[in-house]
Amino acid sequence: MNIETASSETVVTLPVAAPAAVSPLIDRLVSAHGANWLTADNVADWAAAGGDRVILLAGDPVRFPEALDLAVVLPELHRHFAQRFAIGVATREHEDAIAKRYGSIRWPALVFVRDGQYVTVLSGMLDWQVYVERVGEALAMPASRAPTIGIPVRNGSASDSSCH
């Protein structure tokens, strides 16, 4: 429990409890590997807490059994990259909203953010060497706009026609 005092108000922040009926392998990310449960309400603050962060969007392990494989591989990637990133796990009831926020359309997925800004998404289960390469690339990429945040607007003029 965190207690913060702002002026005459005391704000108590409670950690998000483990969701009901979660796979033991996914729960282990939180209980044994220091990951945080993420909801639509706390994901922005968690992502903005600084540094590189990875959000696991596991999906339904019955429909996407590779999510359980990814729950085992993620701590190994964390160790391989010298714990350079924090891990968050989207709760099942909020993962659609979190996926939409970051433009992820496949499950399972790892969403990379840095200092609150979107970096990239790695979707599906990959071979170990491919993960090592892609996670290394993700950690080196600059932050960018998430794919779902509108269409880029250009300041065009009458002579700047893109129709023909």
Image (spheres, helix red, strand yellow):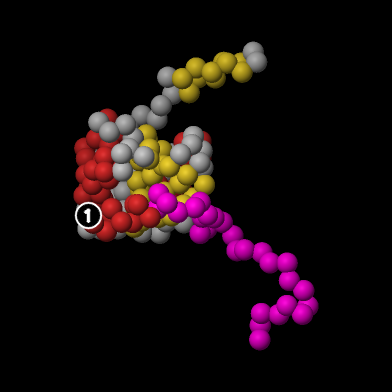
Q: Total label count?
A: 1
Q: Secondary structure at mark 1?
A: helix
The quarter in which the N terminus is drawn is top left
Report x, y in % for residue 34.
32, 31
Q: Which residue is located at x 40 percent, y 49 percent?
A: 139
Where does the magenta region start and end? 138-164
Residue located farthest toward the right when viewing the structure as drawn: 158
Report x, y in % for residue 76.
23, 43
Majority SS type along the magenta span: loop
In this image, 1 relative to 30: left or right? right
Inspect the image, locate mark 1, and give the three-letter code of the amino acid beneath it.
Answer: Trp
Report x, y in % for residue 47.
47, 40
Residue located farthest toward the bottom when viewing the structure as drawn: 164
Q: Which residue is located at x 25 percent, y 31 percent?
A: 32
Which of 77/17 is in front? 77
The quarter in which the C terminus is drawn is bottom right
Residue located farthest toward the top when viewing the structure as drawn: 8
* Label 1 Cα crowd, 10 Å radius (few <14 / some 14-19 / many 20+): few
Q: Which residue is located at x 62 percent, y 63 percent?
A: 152
In this image, 3 relative to 134: left or right? right
Report x, y in % for residue 80.
26, 43
User: Does 141 appear in magenta?
Assistant: yes
Q: Which residue lies under the disc numbered 1?
A: 128
Q: Which residue is located at x 36 percent, y 39 percent?
A: 84
Taking the image as drawn, is residue 149 in sight?
yes
Which of 62/132 is in front? 132
